[in-house]
Image: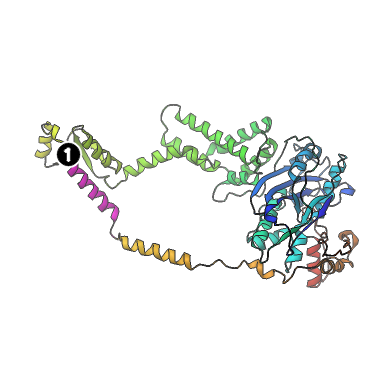
Amino acid sequence: MFVRGQLTRQRGVDPRALTFAILDLQTTGLHPKQGSRACEVGIVRMRGDGVVLDEYSTLINPGLRISNDEFHGITNTDVQHAPRFQDIAGDVLAYLSDSVVVGHNLDFEEKFLVAEFGRLNVTLAQVPGLCSLVTSRVQLDRWGYKLENIANLITDEWPAPLHSALGNARALAAMLAKLIAEAPQPLYWLGPPSAPLPRLPRSGVIAPRAVGLRKGSEGWLATLTARLPRMAYSPQPRPDGLRDYRALLAHALADSRIVGEEANQLAVLAARAGLTQTTARQVHEEFLAGARARAEADGVVTSAELRELHRAAKELAASHLISDLEEAASANRARSNGPLKSWRIMSVGDSAAVTDVVDFAVEHGAKVAVNLTKTVRLAICDGAAENDPRIAKALAAGVDVVSPDQARKLLEGEVTKVRGGLFTDLRGEQVAKRLAAEQVAATRPARPEWHEFWRPRELTAAEYHAMFVERQEDWDEIHTIRITVPAAPNREPVMPTAAKKSGCAAVIAVGGAIVVGVAELVRQVVA
């Protein structure tokens, strides 16, 4: 199915101009010839410069009992409502078409794709493929070539969540983008050009799995949404699953907070509804908009209702939908606690000058009195209202009566004095900013740690065979894939494919005392 290419230091095609389809499968076992089937697929379409173009992910109903859920967490219940492979074959082909297909040990994905498409009498040939496991071994000299180890080394982050098809594909995509962009020596693509694949009818039916949920700083639903595929064109959610999702969402938010168990239940229903990042956000925003409409139905949003909306908005990652309500409430609080909060003023007259200064006072916390009381500290009067009887009463009571201009200067001075505080020093603020700028200028980007493992030169095909294939000959055939290196043409051949991965499906138990070198070999076999 795949014609292997390689990322090499030899001159070739700039990979940043290529489109890659990063692929990962979760399966019911290791051997499709013995009946194992795919039970989840994840694909990330990405340009070589790291720009993600599209994502695709869905559980697959394998039509048989899943007995290895301890490796990938997919249960028989999870796939009960998922599409079968024949239902998504057209979508998978569309996402792999016109690209270089990448897998971390591409042999594993290849044999399952050949088996799955073979059941549909579809034969795929001459598909350009890249094995990132082989690439890692050829270019990097270190221990452990499992996806999580290499991804952590190159990206400096532990992938999350592993053991989900989309999670693995995203981790591999991030690793590949960094490898291409930051390799100590430029890497080039040597291999066949991308080409369109055969077309099959597309159903658009998906059941994406959101796993590895955590509350974090943004809440459970933010993580749930992020775990769903970010599809360029999201299919419409299934109505029955969507109804259940909305009902459970309302139940979970009845106490204004979502806990872990509720988040995991929502993730199950998100898969059954076929939600993507886009459609999940739409559902969450529609839910909050409905709650806001109910709060505003009587014309007043009470403080209790605003608190409920705020908590729900935070859980739904949709605070922008009530930001105007929160800003109004915040402005009210700010005015109540403003620098003029102890001032009560009386305005006499309705000229524009009086109105402006009164508005300024109110914005900074002052209260306005219509009639003179004992708490009034200042009376503002323009010339047209100087005969108002309230002026005489204010003067008799010892209250200052000033013009709008005088009032403005007085109140602005009070605001400046209160805001300034005891230790205000504008020069100190400037010094702090200058020092911060100096520190930024003095900082130089550090050399990535993974560059320390960059081989002085990349392995040849013969060296790769000797290091990663011949050393396996003493091991049980059941755990080894034989790799035949093609005869060398005028130039060095494309690197051979890697040893079989257990990926999501197997752990090799080795008993007894094993030397460090042999233990590393086993890790490489199951990487």
Residue 476 in the image: above or below residue 375:
below
Residue 169 in the image: above or below residue 312:
below
Query: Residue 459 location, x and y as percent?
Result: 78, 68
- Is any part of residue 278 visible from this angle? yes
Is 301 or 403 nearer to us in this picture? Answer: 403
* Magenta span: 403-422
Residue 462 in the image: above or below residue 195:
below
Identify the residue shown where x is 84% and y is 45%.
124
- Is any part of residue 374 visible from this angle? no
Tell me which secondary structure the magenta stretch mostly adopts.
helix
Q: Hey, which quadrant is residue 358 in on the image?
A: top left
Query: In the drawing, does residue 222 fall left or right of residue 140?
Result: left
**Does residue 407 belong to the magenta stretch?**
yes
Query: Residue 456 location, x and y as percent?
Result: 72, 72
What kind of element bears circle 1? strand
The number of discs equals 1
Residue 309 in the image: above or below residue 191:
above
Query: In the drawing, does residue 187 fall left or right of residue 514?
Result: left
Identify the residue shown where x is 65% and y is 33%.
242
Q: Which residue is mark 1?
A: 379
Residue type, numbered disc 1: Ala
Is 452 or 476 nearer to us in this picture? Answer: 452
**Does residue 486 belong to the magenta stretch?**
no
Q: Hey, which quadrant is residue 203 in on the image?
A: top right
Is 260 or 209 nearer to us in this picture? Answer: 209
Query: Residue 138 location, x and y as percent?
Result: 76, 65
Query: Residue 289 location, x and y as percent?
Result: 52, 33
Q: Residues within 10 Å of mark 1 (few under 14, many from 20)?
A: many
Specify the quadrant that holds the C terminus. bottom right
Query: In the drawing, does residue 359 fall left or right of residue 381?
Result: right
